[in-house]
Amino acid sequence: SADVAFRGTDGFNANTTAPTVQIPSSVQPGDGLVLVLTLNDTSVTVTPPAGWTQVGTQSNGTAVSTVWQRVAQAGDAGGSVTLGLDAYAKADLRILAYAHTDADGPIASTAKFVDPAAATSHPAPSVEVTEPGSWVVTYWADKSATTTAWTAPGGVTTRATAVGSGAGRITSLVADSGGAVPTGTYQGKTATTDAASRALMWTLVLARQS
């Protein structure tokens, strides 16, 4: 089987009722797509895009984060993905695309964690890797009036950061392993912010196509 490879990413961060990202133009049919949305308001109802499967959701205070996945189809490359919100919210939306992931869906397993108290160190959870050739994606986000920067841990490849504006904004960091990881326990990575906050973290295992 061919090795997993990073195709591209796009992001959106603003106060909106319709967060939208573009599917990277390099995407090919069969590629794995991962979509992560973090909002600053748990009362907002989200209408997900058609053709995407929800993987999980979690909340921390009034912030909420949800992950979806999709196997790319012909015609997806360069298209837009829009989620509907029933009220304005500050949103961080991130799409990531990977080649040669499992044909049933790129995400083999997930782990999630939220900070129990405000801190500048934000540990993502560990996760079990069962399939050789798997990659791991880690996503961190917070709702904060003071965070202006994230610092990624060592041993990962940073794919994007985003910082919103105003009070209650969402900021985020996403990184991946940049290559296959050994089977067994993948130790969760710890990112830091320049101000104390309560963050939400995802660790996602991407399975290689068999």
Image: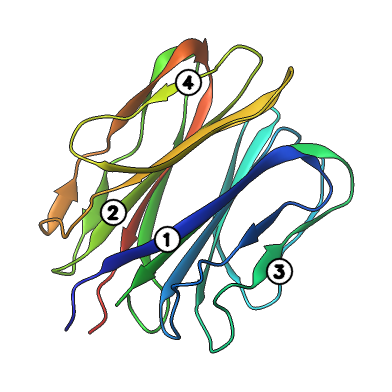
Q: Quadrant of the C terminus?
A: bottom left
Q: Are marks 4 and 2 in contact (CB under 8 Å)?
A: no
The reply, left or right, for residue 148 in relation to residue 13 is left
Quadrant in which residue 129 is drawn: bottom left
**2 or 1: mark nearer the eye:** 1
Quadrant in which residue 189 is drawn: top left
Q: Which residue is label 2 attached to?
A: 136
**4 or 2: mark nearer the eye:** 4
What is the distance, in whole Å, between disc 2 and disc 3 at their CAs? 24 Å
Disc on res. 24? none
| Residue 77, position as x, y percentages in the image | 54, 77
- Badge 1 or badge 4: first in the primary sequence: 1
- Badge 2 or badge 3: first in the primary sequence: 3
Quadrant in which residue 76 is drawn: bottom right
Q: Which residue is label 3 attached to?
A: 49
Q: Work out whether 43 lies above or below 143.
A: below
Q: Which residue is label 1 attached to?
A: 8
Disc on res. 149? 4
Q: The residue tagged with tag 1: helix, strand or loop?
A: strand
Which residue is drawn at the image coordinates 67% and 65% (left, top)? 81
What is the distance, in whole Å, between disc 4 and disc 2 at their CAs? 23 Å
- Badge 1 or badge 3: first in the primary sequence: 1
